[in-house]
Amino acid sequence: MKKKINLGITIFFILIMMSLYITFLFFDNHVSISKVEYAGIIACFTFVWIILINDLDIWLVRFALLFTLISDWFLVIKGDHQLLAVITFIFAQGFYAIRLWFNEDSNNRKILHIYTRVILFIALELGALIILKKNFDGLVFASLLYFSLLLINVIIAFKNTNKNILFALGLLFFLGCDIMVGLSTIEDYLAIGESSLIYKLLNAPIDLVWFFYFPSQTLLALSVLTNKKISSTISK
Protein backbone atom coordinates (compact mmCIF):
# COMPACT_ATOMS: atom_id res chain seq x y z
CA MET A 1 0.00 0.00 0.00
CA LYS A 2 2.80 2.40 0.97
CA LYS A 3 4.58 1.75 -2.34
CA LYS A 4 1.45 2.56 -4.32
CA ILE A 5 0.90 5.78 -2.39
CA ASN A 6 4.53 6.81 -2.88
CA LEU A 7 4.30 6.01 -6.58
CA GLY A 8 1.19 8.16 -6.92
CA ILE A 9 2.78 11.05 -5.02
CA THR A 10 5.93 10.79 -7.14
CA ILE A 11 4.08 10.78 -10.47
CA PHE A 12 1.96 13.75 -9.37
CA PHE A 13 5.09 15.62 -8.24
CA ILE A 14 6.90 14.99 -11.53
CA LEU A 15 3.90 16.16 -13.55
CA ILE A 16 3.68 19.36 -11.49
CA MET A 17 7.39 20.08 -11.92
CA MET A 18 7.28 19.42 -15.66
CA SER A 19 4.29 21.75 -16.03
CA LEU A 20 5.98 24.53 -14.06
CA TYR A 21 9.26 24.03 -15.96
CA ILE A 22 7.56 24.34 -19.34
CA THR A 23 5.56 27.33 -18.13
CA PHE A 24 8.45 29.55 -17.07
CA LEU A 25 10.70 28.49 -19.95
CA PHE A 26 8.27 29.04 -22.79
CA PHE A 27 5.38 31.14 -21.48
CA ASP A 28 7.29 33.75 -19.50
CA ASN A 29 5.37 36.61 -21.11
CA HIS A 30 2.06 35.40 -19.70
CA VAL A 31 2.85 34.52 -16.06
CA SER A 32 4.66 35.88 -13.02
CA ILE A 33 7.94 34.04 -13.52
CA SER A 34 9.26 34.50 -10.00
CA LYS A 35 6.09 33.04 -8.49
CA VAL A 36 6.14 30.05 -10.85
CA GLU A 37 9.81 29.40 -10.09
CA TYR A 38 9.29 29.63 -6.34
CA ALA A 39 6.22 27.39 -6.57
CA GLY A 40 8.52 24.70 -7.94
CA ILE A 41 10.84 24.98 -4.94
CA ILE A 42 7.82 24.77 -2.61
CA ALA A 43 6.70 21.64 -4.50
CA CYS A 44 10.12 20.00 -3.97
CA PHE A 45 10.04 20.84 -0.28
CA THR A 46 6.48 19.54 0.05
CA PHE A 47 7.30 16.31 -1.79
CA VAL A 48 10.03 15.24 0.64
CA TRP A 49 7.70 15.90 3.57
CA ILE A 50 4.65 14.00 2.32
CA ILE A 51 6.40 11.00 0.75
CA LEU A 52 6.01 7.99 3.06
CA ILE A 53 9.67 7.56 4.01
CA ASN A 54 11.08 8.15 7.48
CA ASP A 55 14.82 7.55 7.66
CA LEU A 56 17.93 9.61 8.35
CA ASP A 57 18.57 10.26 4.67
CA ILE A 58 15.25 11.95 3.99
CA TRP A 59 15.60 14.14 7.07
CA LEU A 60 18.92 15.45 5.76
CA VAL A 61 17.29 16.28 2.42
CA ARG A 62 14.30 17.85 4.18
CA PHE A 63 16.53 20.25 6.09
CA ALA A 64 18.60 20.98 2.97
CA LEU A 65 15.46 21.88 1.02
CA LEU A 66 14.16 23.94 3.94
CA PHE A 67 17.24 26.15 3.77
CA THR A 68 16.97 26.22 -0.03
CA LEU A 69 13.39 27.42 0.33
CA ILE A 70 14.55 30.21 2.64
CA SER A 71 17.36 31.20 0.26
CA ASP A 72 15.03 31.43 -2.70
CA TRP A 73 12.56 33.48 -0.69
CA PHE A 74 15.26 36.14 -0.35
CA LEU A 75 16.51 35.87 -3.94
CA VAL A 76 13.36 35.16 -5.94
CA ILE A 77 10.52 36.74 -3.98
CA LYS A 78 12.16 39.52 -1.98
CA GLY A 79 14.96 40.20 -4.45
CA ASP A 80 17.40 41.31 -1.75
CA HIS A 81 19.35 40.10 1.32
CA GLN A 82 21.88 38.34 -0.90
CA LEU A 83 24.24 37.58 1.99
CA LEU A 84 21.48 35.90 3.99
CA ALA A 85 20.53 33.88 0.91
CA VAL A 86 24.11 32.66 0.47
CA ILE A 87 24.38 31.77 4.16
CA THR A 88 21.22 29.66 4.03
CA PHE A 89 22.51 28.00 0.83
CA ILE A 90 25.65 27.12 2.81
CA PHE A 91 23.47 25.27 5.31
CA ALA A 92 21.74 23.45 2.44
CA GLN A 93 25.06 22.28 1.00
CA GLY A 94 26.20 21.41 4.50
CA PHE A 95 23.32 18.96 4.89
CA TYR A 96 24.15 17.45 1.49
CA ALA A 97 27.77 17.11 2.64
CA ILE A 98 26.56 15.26 5.74
CA ARG A 99 24.48 13.01 3.49
CA LEU A 100 27.57 12.14 1.47
CA TRP A 101 29.50 11.54 4.69
CA PHE A 102 26.97 8.98 5.93
CA ASN A 103 26.87 7.34 2.50
CA GLU A 104 30.63 6.77 2.61
CA ASP A 105 31.74 3.24 3.48
CA SER A 106 35.37 3.94 4.34
CA ASN A 107 36.53 5.92 7.37
CA ASN A 108 39.65 6.89 5.43
CA ARG A 109 37.50 8.41 2.70
CA LYS A 110 35.50 10.26 5.34
CA ILE A 111 38.71 11.82 6.63
CA LEU A 112 39.65 12.65 3.03
CA HIS A 113 36.32 14.47 2.69
CA ILE A 114 37.33 16.81 5.49
CA TYR A 115 40.88 17.44 4.28
CA THR A 116 39.73 18.11 0.72
CA ARG A 117 37.06 20.55 1.82
CA VAL A 118 39.39 22.44 4.16
CA ILE A 119 42.18 22.72 1.58
CA LEU A 120 39.88 23.94 -1.20
CA PHE A 121 38.15 26.41 1.13
CA ILE A 122 41.44 27.92 2.34
CA ALA A 123 42.85 28.09 -1.21
CA LEU A 124 39.77 29.88 -2.55
CA GLU A 125 39.58 32.36 0.32
CA LEU A 126 43.30 33.19 0.21
CA GLY A 127 43.22 33.55 -3.57
CA ALA A 128 40.25 35.90 -3.40
CA LEU A 129 41.83 37.90 -0.58
CA ILE A 130 45.03 38.38 -2.60
CA ILE A 131 43.17 39.36 -5.77
CA LEU A 132 40.41 41.51 -4.29
CA LYS A 133 42.27 42.96 -1.30
CA LYS A 134 40.04 45.72 0.15
CA ASN A 135 37.09 44.53 -1.94
CA PHE A 136 37.09 41.20 -0.11
CA ASP A 137 33.94 41.25 2.01
CA GLY A 138 31.50 39.01 3.83
CA LEU A 139 29.57 38.17 0.68
CA VAL A 140 32.74 37.02 -1.11
CA PHE A 141 33.76 34.95 1.92
CA ALA A 142 30.35 33.29 2.18
CA SER A 143 30.06 32.72 -1.58
CA LEU A 144 33.42 30.95 -1.72
CA LEU A 145 32.55 28.79 1.28
CA TYR A 146 29.30 27.85 -0.44
CA PHE A 147 31.04 27.13 -3.76
CA SER A 148 33.71 24.98 -2.10
CA LEU A 149 31.02 22.88 -0.43
CA LEU A 150 29.04 22.49 -3.65
CA LEU A 151 32.05 21.62 -5.81
CA ILE A 152 33.31 18.92 -3.46
CA ASN A 153 29.77 17.60 -3.05
CA VAL A 154 29.52 17.19 -6.83
CA ILE A 155 32.87 15.40 -7.05
CA ILE A 156 32.14 13.01 -4.18
CA ALA A 157 28.60 12.32 -5.41
CA PHE A 158 29.89 11.35 -8.85
CA LYS A 159 32.50 9.07 -7.32
CA ASN A 160 29.57 7.26 -5.68
CA THR A 161 26.98 7.29 -8.44
CA ASN A 162 26.25 3.62 -7.75
CA LYS A 163 24.68 4.74 -4.46
CA ASN A 164 22.52 7.56 -5.80
CA ILE A 165 22.73 8.71 -9.41
CA LEU A 166 19.86 11.18 -9.04
CA PHE A 167 21.66 12.93 -6.19
CA ALA A 168 24.83 13.27 -8.28
CA LEU A 169 22.91 14.63 -11.27
CA GLY A 170 20.97 17.03 -9.06
CA LEU A 171 24.18 18.48 -7.63
CA LEU A 172 25.69 18.72 -11.13
CA PHE A 173 22.72 20.76 -12.36
CA PHE A 174 23.07 22.85 -9.19
CA LEU A 175 26.68 23.56 -10.17
CA GLY A 176 25.60 24.44 -13.72
CA CYS A 177 23.16 26.97 -12.28
CA ASP A 178 25.82 28.59 -10.13
CA ILE A 179 28.28 28.74 -13.02
CA MET A 180 25.68 30.71 -14.96
CA VAL A 181 25.16 33.00 -11.96
CA GLY A 182 28.92 33.51 -11.80
CA LEU A 183 29.15 34.29 -15.51
CA SER A 184 26.41 36.91 -15.14
CA THR A 185 28.60 38.83 -12.69
CA ILE A 186 31.60 38.87 -15.03
CA GLU A 187 30.01 41.70 -16.99
CA ASP A 188 30.56 43.92 -13.95
CA TYR A 189 34.32 43.45 -14.23
CA LEU A 190 35.12 42.61 -17.86
CA ALA A 191 33.98 43.75 -21.29
CA ILE A 192 32.20 40.82 -22.95
CA GLY A 193 32.22 40.83 -26.75
CA GLU A 194 29.00 39.96 -28.56
CA SER A 195 30.76 37.18 -30.44
CA SER A 196 31.96 35.45 -27.26
CA LEU A 197 30.41 32.28 -25.89
CA ILE A 198 29.79 33.95 -22.54
CA TYR A 199 27.76 36.72 -24.18
CA LYS A 200 25.68 34.19 -26.11
CA LEU A 201 25.01 32.16 -22.96
CA LEU A 202 24.00 35.24 -20.97
CA ASN A 203 21.67 36.37 -23.74
CA ALA A 204 20.12 32.99 -24.52
CA PRO A 205 16.38 33.01 -25.29
CA ILE A 206 15.72 31.11 -22.05
CA ASP A 207 16.92 31.73 -18.49
CA LEU A 208 19.82 29.28 -18.21
CA VAL A 209 20.14 29.82 -14.46
CA TRP A 210 16.69 28.33 -13.88
CA PHE A 211 17.12 25.95 -16.80
CA PHE A 212 19.69 24.20 -14.58
CA TYR A 213 18.35 25.09 -11.14
CA PHE A 214 14.80 23.79 -11.52
CA PRO A 215 15.83 20.24 -12.55
CA SER A 216 18.52 20.26 -9.86
CA GLN A 217 15.98 20.71 -7.09
CA THR A 218 13.63 18.18 -8.68
CA LEU A 219 16.37 15.55 -8.87
CA LEU A 220 17.57 16.26 -5.34
CA ALA A 221 14.03 15.78 -4.04
CA LEU A 222 13.55 12.57 -6.04
CA SER A 223 16.91 11.25 -4.82
CA VAL A 224 15.30 10.29 -1.50
CA LEU A 225 13.70 7.42 -3.44
CA THR A 226 16.97 6.03 -4.80
CA ASN A 227 19.48 6.27 -1.95
CA LYS A 228 21.17 2.92 -1.27
CA LYS A 229 23.21 3.54 1.89
CA ILE A 230 21.39 5.39 4.68
CA SER A 231 18.46 3.18 5.57
CA SER A 232 18.04 3.32 9.33
CA THR A 233 14.42 4.17 10.12
CA ILE A 234 13.76 6.94 12.61
CA SER A 235 11.14 6.00 15.13
CA LYS A 236 8.13 8.26 15.33
Image (cartoon, rainbow, N blue to C red):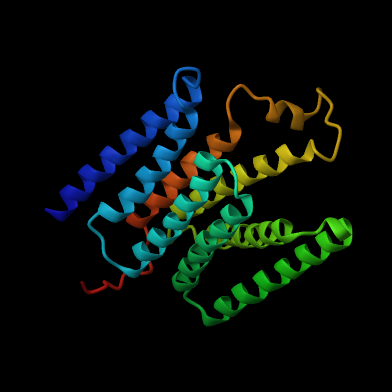
Residue 223 in percent (x, y) is at 39, 53
Nearer to the camera, 211 or 105: 211
Q: Residue at x 57, y 76 (%)?
A: 109
Q: Residue at x 41, y 65 (%)?
A: 60
Image quarter for residue 196? top right
Is 198 left or right of 69, judged from the image as shown?
right
Identify the image quadrant of the C terminus.
bottom left
Residue 47 in percent (x, y) is at 31, 49
Q: Residue at x 55, y 56 (%)?
A: 89
Q: How many numbered discs? A: 0
Q: Is residue 233 above or below residue 5?
A: below
Q: Is residue 83 above or below residue 215?
A: below
Is 140 left or right of 88, judged from the image as shown?
right
Is 106 left or right of 113, judged from the image as shown?
left
Image quarter for residue 59? bottom left
Nearer to the camera, 31 or 47: 31
Nearer to the camera, 1 or 49: 49
Residue 52 in percent (x, y) is at 22, 57
Q: Can residue 165 be seen in this snapshot?
A: no
Residue lying farthest to the left in this orientation: 1
Q: Can residue 67 be seen in this snapshot?
A: yes
Nearer to the camera, 181 or 220: 181
Q: Is residue 155 above or below residue 174?
A: below
Q: Residue at x 17, y 48 (%)?
A: 5
Residue 190 in percent (x, y) is at 85, 37
